[in-house]
Amino acid sequence: MKAVFQTDVGKIRSHNEDNGGVFINQAGNYLAVVADGMGGHLAGDVASEMTMTQLKQFWEETGEMTSPQQAEMWLKEHVMKVNESLFHHSQTNEHCQGMGTTVVAAICTNQFATIGHIGDSRCYLLNANGFQQMTEDHSLVNELVKSGQLSKEDAEYHPRKHVLLRALGTEQTIQLDVKTVTIDKGDMLLLCSDGLSNKVTEQTMIDVLTSDRSLEEKAQALINVANEHGGEDNITLAIIQFVDVDESR
C-alpha cells in the first residue's frame, strides 16, 4: 500500500479545524482518518485532534486485522470510546461545550477495506467498476434528498447544507455506519472533509486520481482545485493506493 494525507486551511478561514492522518499498526495494516471539527471558538480543533490522537494510539497498539468482522468491530468499539471521551470533555470544559466532529475512517488490508463514518466527511472508492461514494452523509439536506423533498442539484446550494444530524462527541452514545469492500490491486480510496467534496466534482476527482502524478501531487492537485473554487472551508484528504495486493488469493 501507498498512502498520503494532506490538510489545508483554505483561503478564507484563519485556522484549521480539520485533522486526521494515516497510521500503521504492528502488522502493517493501515488506518486512514479524516475528522472535521465544529462548535465554538477552537473547540472544533479540540474535537478533531482528540479523535485523531486517540484513534492513532488505539491503532498502533492493535495487531493484524484478519477479517472484515474483526475490523468492523474494532471501528465500532474504538470510535465509541472516542465519542465518550469527547462528550465527557465537552461536559467538563466550558469553552468546549457543544463541540463535535465528523469522522470517516478506513481500515485497509491487502484483502479488504472497512469504512466507518459519522457526519458528512466522505469515502470514495476507485476500482475496475468505476468511482463510487461509499458513505452516506448524515445531514439534513441528504435526508431531504432521500425523501424526495429536494433534488440533488438543489441540495448543492441549500442554505442548510452544513446542518448535521449525527456527529461524534455531541451525544453520550452514537451510531457508526460501517461497510467492507473487497480490494484488488490498483484500487484507491479517497477520504475527505466536505471542504473538498463541496468544491470538487466527482469527475475532477476521477481525472486527478487516474492521472500519472504521484500520490502527493494528486493530493495537492485536489486541494488546489478546492481553493480555486473558493476555498471557504478547511480541506483535508487521505488517499490510499493498493499496489501490493496479494494476487495469490
Image (cartoon, rainbow, N blue to C red):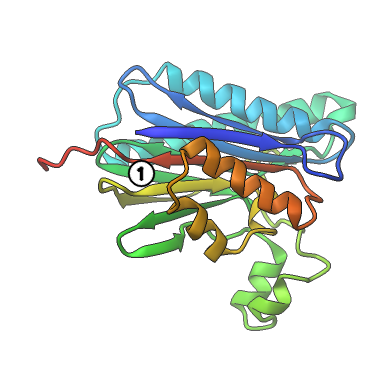
Residue occupying the point 53% across, 46% down: 191
Residue annotated with mark 1 = 113
Instruction: Identify the image quadrant of the N terminus.
Output: top left
- The C terminus, quarter of image: top left
Seen in the picture, residue 50 relative to 192 is either above or below; the reply is above
**In the picture shown, does residue 53 fall above or below 102?**
above
> Looking at this rendering, what residue extends furthest in the left direction?
248
Q: Nearer the viewer, residue 81 or 164?
A: 164
Q: Does 114 appear above or below 22? A: below
104 left or right of 242 in image: right
Q: Amino acid at mark 1?
A: Ala
Residue at screen point 62% across, 79% down: 147
Q: Is residue 38 left or right of residue 237?
A: right
Q: Position of residue 195 (x, y in %)?
A: 70, 50
Q: Is residue 175 visible?
A: no
Locate residue 92: give its quadrant.
Answer: top right
Q: How many residues crowd around disc 1 within 10 Å: few (fewer than 14), some, or many (20 or more)?
A: many
Provide residue 76's location: percent of width, then percent of height.
Answer: 47, 39
Q: Residue at x 89, y 34 (%)?
A: 41
Q: Position of residue 144 (x, y in %)?
A: 68, 75
- SS of the residue under disc 1: strand
Question: Dividing the picture into quarters, in which one does residue 162 lie?
Answer: bottom right
- Looking at the image, residue 31 sits to the left or right of residue 68; the answer is right
Determine the residue positioned at 68% across, 61% down: 139
Q: Position of residue 202 (x, y in %)?
A: 55, 63
Residue in the foreground of this view, choosing between 143 and 213: 213
* Any part of residue 114 in sight: yes
